[in-house]
Amino acid sequence: MKNTLYLFGLLLFSPFLLFAQSKKAINLDEVTDKHFLNGIEILNSILSMPNDSNDPEQLVANIEWCEDNFEKRQWKTERLETAGFPMLLAERNIPKAKKTVLFYFHIDGQPVDRKRWEQEDPYKPVLKKQNSSGKWEIIPMETLHNTYDPEWRIFARSSSDDKGPLAMFLTAWDAMVENNKMPNYNVKVILDFEEEIGSPHLPAAINKHKEKLAANMVLIMDGPRHLSNEPTLSFGARGISQFTLKVFGPRAAQHSGHYGNYAPNPAFRMTQLLASMKDDGGRVTIPGFYDGIILTDEEKKILDQVPDDENEIKSKLGIGSTDKVGNTYQESLQYPSLNIRGLSSGWVGDEVRTIVPADATAEIDVRLVPESDPERLFSLIRKHIEGQGYHILENDPTDEERAKYPKLVKWEGSISYKAFRTPFDSEPGIWLNKAMNRAFGKDPIRKRISGGSLPIAPFVDALNVPAVTVVTVNADNNQHGPNENIRLGNYKEGIKTALAILTEEL
């Protein structure tokens, strides 16, 4: 009788026992290995479409690919209209789920200079291995059906930034479903197709669609791991704003023999103006630029937990000394930056000519931290420029303005997005730390803020939720440049990371 009752009870509760066991039974490494080749197919498929966000026509095939791939996985998709190219929202509601996680990816890419890519087409992904002389050589993609080396790489535009992470996510989703598992939370994915041009329409679109985007947290799958290539979480990102300065000399370029020493040279004036903004240690000298940023001993301890090797970083960059804004690399990221990203005046090289240039242009970006308001920084910079004797214009000068003001500069500025920062002990911080521990058997490297900019602050502000960046790709991926690539070991571990997150109870 006891045995009968025991068997009856076992049959009665077996679904619940099997469910409980299945929650723990998934072997992340085995499941990832099994689905790795499927992940390569997904990656190669999404990489095979041009995606320059400066050309909206290229983005059409990309958004259609994303719609098809989410819908065939039984997700609901909806295009969210913006003043530019639409965003795509994909949703998967889970019965009885009490919380919602919003994942952010961007699908667009930087322009390509095809002549500088060491392959036929940047949009035709190729598998490469490094030979004994350090050169990357193409090997057949089919090689992966028989063997695998984590150091091999797939080269293509957006392989790391940011199509690779989306392919990781989709692969992990397929692996999870095949193993009869689902998250215990609702999942939303928002796909941005204008990130590489600064997501100019995203803030307004988030406010317009914030009810559809509502979630308990935002996870961003974008960006490289720490230089050590250890599993990494980033709890913030600097924002970005930019401005262009154009200093004027004579109305047209003049013969330097006739007018050198007479007509003021705008290139010299521009360099003097720019040099006045920083000291020899690379610190911005504009009063108030760093106001509000005081690193406490506790915050410095958090920064010191990142295992940076300062000598290795300097060696990688090919520099013998660093700017003195912070005492370490991590400290330097806690302050706003003022960076000259381009200078132009006259001609150089084979086209050089003996002239006094008509004008000089400087392109400048300002990386932001949460304590720095971009409007305030712009005001301080403009005040400094005026203090150097310049009259600031919004357009090219008229003849009357040329005659009236001895120093003229045109200003064009814009703010892309602000910075964000989330505490380590926030809900997503604690939850993600558990998932990463389950995947890799140790705590991830946790960065207080990353140097690169992401359009996430609008989500944080509009939705009033915390955000964390789950970074997966190799740091030496050449993002934005020729020969962008993703290391196969990072791709596989990225799949495992996504699978761990999707199967971690929230």
Image (spheres, grey):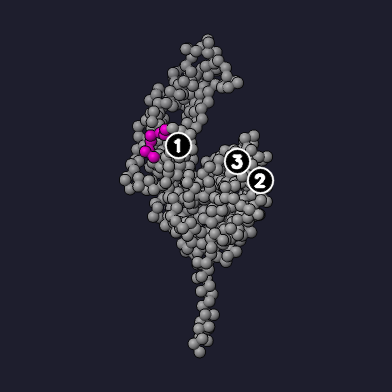
Q: How far, Cα to Cα, is label 2 from label 3?
A: 15 Å
How many marks can you see?
3
Q: Position of residue 222 (x, y in %)?
A: 52, 48
Q: Residues within 10 Å of mark 2 (few under 14, many from 20)?
A: few
Question: Does the magenta stretch mainly form a helix, a strand or a loop?
Answer: loop
Could one spot residue 212 in this view of the protein? no
Q: How far, Cα to Cα, is label 2 from label 1?
A: 33 Å
Mark 2 / mark 1, whichever is N-terminal: 2
Instruction: Name the residue carrying label 2.
Output: 139
In the rendering, which numbered label is found on residue 314? 1
Q: Position of residue 45 (x, y in %)?
A: 65, 50
Relative placement, left or right, of 129 versus 420 is right
Kind of residue at badge 3: Ser
The residue positioned 55% from the left and 45% from the top of the image is 161
Instruction: Return the residue nearer the eye: 7 or 455.
Output: 7
Instruction: Name the residue carrying label 3.
Output: 132
Vertical placement of residue 135 versus 179, above or below: above
Kind of residue at badge 2: Ile
Q: Position of residue 175 (x, y in %)?
A: 58, 60
Q: For the residues labelled 2 and 3, say whether their Cβ atoms are less than 8 Å apart.
A: no
* Residue extending farthest top: 258
Q: Which residues are magenta?
A: 321-328
Kind of residue at badge 1: Lys
Instruction: Return the residue nearer the eye: 14 or 462.
Output: 14
